[in-house]
Image (tube, rainbow, N blue to C red):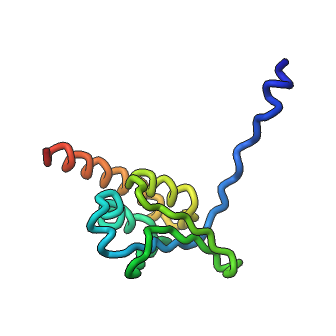
């Protein structure tokens, strides 16, 4: 019975790390999407490998790439994603820089998230 029960279980797929990423967005869309705006203005800077690129008419998307294989780009449509989900996605897929300043980026991001929560709860 255990063998039958576990028969459909699969190990979690390993998440491939990428060296750089671009968040593509339309500036007007950012003004209408509070979570996208929050991520770009308060959290994106904490990811050294992430670049924000504005393209008129673009749907919000994250493109992940590696210099080793320039023909392979992973693109994720992030329309309607919450700011916290964007942080989790980029954190899981973007390679962590080796320097000690980058190690503190997670702590700094946590501080920003606390601050953002306080502002949202105080703004009524």
Placement of 11 over or under 22, stated as above or below: above
In this picture, residue 120 sits left or right of residue 28: left
Quick check: 4 left or right of 17?
A: right
- Vertical placement of residue 116 versus 75, above or below: above
Seen in the picture, residue 39 relative to 114 is either above or below; the reply is below
Percent x, y of residue 95: 58, 64
Res. 74 image quadrant: bottom right
What is the tally of numbered marks visible in this picture? 0
Q: Quadrant of residue 65?
A: bottom right
Give the residue drawn at x 58%, y 68%. 75
The C terminus lies in which quarter of the figure?
top left
Q: Identify the residue at horizontal 32%, vertical 68% (top origin).
A: 30
Front in this rendered view, residue 111 or 73: 73
Above or below, 72 relative to 83: below
Say which residue appears at 41% left-offset and 57% top-offset.
Answer: 80
Q: Which residue is most to the top? A: 1
């Amino acid at each position: 019975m255990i063998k039958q029960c576990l028969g459909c279980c699969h190990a979690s797929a390993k998440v491939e790390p990428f060296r750089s990423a671009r968040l593509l967005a339309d500036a007007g869309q950012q003004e209408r999407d509070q979570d996208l705006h929050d991520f770009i203005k308060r959290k994106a800077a904490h990811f050294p490998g992430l670049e924000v690129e504005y393209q008129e008419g673009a749907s919000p998307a994250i493109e992940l790439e590696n210099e080793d294989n320039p023909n392979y780009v992973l693109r994720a449509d992030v329309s309607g994603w919450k700011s916290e989900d964007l942080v989790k996605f980029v954190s899981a897929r973007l390679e962590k820089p080796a320097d000690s300043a980058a190690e503190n980026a997670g702590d700094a991001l946590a501080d920003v998230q606390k601050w953002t929560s306080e502002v949202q709860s105080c703004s009524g």
